Image (cartoon, grey):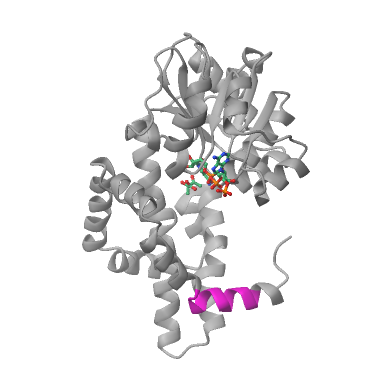
């Protein structure tokens, strides 16, 4: 059984007297910076002046700096920029301000694993990767809990990188739930695979395909929305709390039989082959190349596909229903 690290395994004192810079105040940045500040760490943030997230950082009580200023001042520099801009900002603003003994921290291994950022040998390089969206990393922390996290040590120049990583994970709330040690390679490749094949790509396509099947067959779009999207959260909540078996205990035997006979017709051998191809493309760097090139040419494919998806009937029906339903506590 894998070793899990909890609060008692991490000592915030190892970061005492150290300034932590969070560069990028977005989904993860706003969450991790506030969580670490609440945990008593000395946190500064960097954000682009004049942007909504800059204003949010000010509203949250920070005085946002440039990435260069933050890197110069801090001992621990956490890069929570979009993966596709990290290389540019790192080499132009962060690296020139690194000092021996600093720590460079990531929450996803993309830029290190695919060789976009090659840090100097005299700094620690580690990862603290919450396994959840940033806004829930903050929400759950304020409720007294934590989102589980991964840590990975890429470079241990000081000999203390793991202690720093565990303390950092404690600061963001990860050790409240549990922390597992991995590698930059394993986190990068599994995270990319998960967000493409299961969490985001696979699930959104499954939801849209189910919705379209019902709507094309003449059923009310609202009914299709309830069945294929809204209820999915409730089903997944049960899986989250107690595994697939717990979810199956709660649904009807009729639904469970349907689950058992239909699942493999939808996610069939062809689907599994497609998943393996996605993983191969990730492992061989094909996805990374495609994503970095897409950004270099202004995201034509991303923008077109995003526009089509955001114009989908399921978005319109969902917005209408969410405006009418009393469901969020
Ligand atoms: N989103 C998530 O839940 C998770 C993300 N991660 C990882 O965390 C990292 C950050 O991702 P995420 O939080 O989603 O990113 P976001 O895009 O949400 O936030 C990045 C922030 O950095 C800002 N920014 C861009 N350029 C600069 C700059 N030059 N100087 C300062 N700030 C800048 C962006 O501003 P603007 O928007 O105006 O460009 C934005 O506010 C990535 O490595 C990601 O893979 C890991 C786990 C989960
Ligand atoms: C939330 C998370 O970990 C994702 C989906 O992999 C991401 O946003 O990068």
Asked if residue 189 is positioned above or below residue 99 in the image, the reply reads below
Residue at position x 39%, y 55% from top? 198
Residue at position x 38%, y 62% from top? 300
Is residue 262 one of those drawn in magenta? no
Question: In the rendered structure, which segment of residues is drawn in magenta?
Answer: 311-321
| Prevailing secondary structure of the magenta residues | helix
- Look at the image and tell me in which quarter the N terminus lies: top left
Residue 139 picture quarter: top right
Q: Position of residue 191 (x, y in %)?
A: 40, 43
Asked if residue 217 is positioned above or below residue 35 in the image, the reply reads below
Residue 35: in sight, yes or no? yes
Residue at position x 45%, y 85% from top? 215
Q: Position of residue 314 (x, y in %)?
A: 51, 76
> In this rendering, would 197 be left or right of 44?
left
Ligand 1, image quadrant it occupies: top right
**Which residue is most to the top?**
159
In front here: 80 or 126? 80
> In this rendering, would 207 be left or right of 176?
left
Q: Position of residue 216 (x, y in %)?
A: 41, 87
Q: Position of residue 317 (x, y in %)?
A: 57, 79
- Look at the image and tell me in which quarter the C terminus lies: bottom right
In front here: 183 or 77? 77
């Amino acid at each position: 059984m894998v070793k899990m690290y909890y609060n008692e395994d991490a000592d915030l004192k190892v970061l005492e007297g150290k300034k932590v810079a969070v560069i990028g105040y977005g989904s993860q940045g706003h969450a991790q910076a506030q969580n670490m500040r609440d945990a008593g760490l000395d946190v500064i943030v960097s954000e682009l002046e004049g942007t909504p997230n800059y204003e949010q950082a000010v509203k949250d009580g920070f005085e946002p700096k440039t990435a260069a200023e933050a890197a110069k001042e801090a001992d621990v520099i956490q890069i929570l920029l979009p993966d596709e801009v990290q290389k540019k900002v790192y080499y132009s603003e962060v690296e020139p301000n690194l000092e021996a003994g600093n720590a460079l921290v990531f929450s996803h291994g993309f830029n290190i694993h695919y060789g976009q950022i090659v840090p100097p040998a005299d700094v620690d390089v580690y990862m603290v990767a919450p396994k959840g969206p940033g806004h829930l990393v903050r929400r759950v922390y304020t409720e007294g809990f934590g989102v589980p996290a991964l840590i990975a040590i890429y470079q241990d120049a000081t000999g203390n990188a793991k202690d720093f990583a565990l303390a950092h994970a404690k600061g963001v709330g990860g050790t409240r739930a549990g922390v597992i040690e991995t590698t930059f390679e394993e986190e990068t490749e599994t995270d990319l695979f998960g967000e493409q094949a299961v969490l985001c790509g696979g699930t959104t396509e499954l939801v849209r395909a189910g919705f379209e099947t019902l709507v094309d067959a003449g059923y009310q779009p609202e009914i299709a929305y309830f069945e294929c999207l809204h209820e999915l959260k409730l089903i997944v909540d049960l899986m989250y709390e107690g595994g697939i078996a717990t979810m199956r205990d709660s649904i009807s035997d009729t639904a469970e039989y349907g689950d058992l006979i239909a699942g493999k017709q939808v996610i069939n051998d062809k689907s599994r082959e497609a998943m393996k191809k996605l993983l191969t493309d990730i492992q061989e760097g094909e996805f990374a190349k495609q994503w970095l090139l897409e950004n270099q040419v202004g995201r034509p494919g991303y923008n077109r596909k995003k526009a089509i998806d955001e114009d989908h009937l399921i978005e319109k029906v969902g917005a209408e229903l969410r405006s009418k339903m009393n469901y969020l506590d």
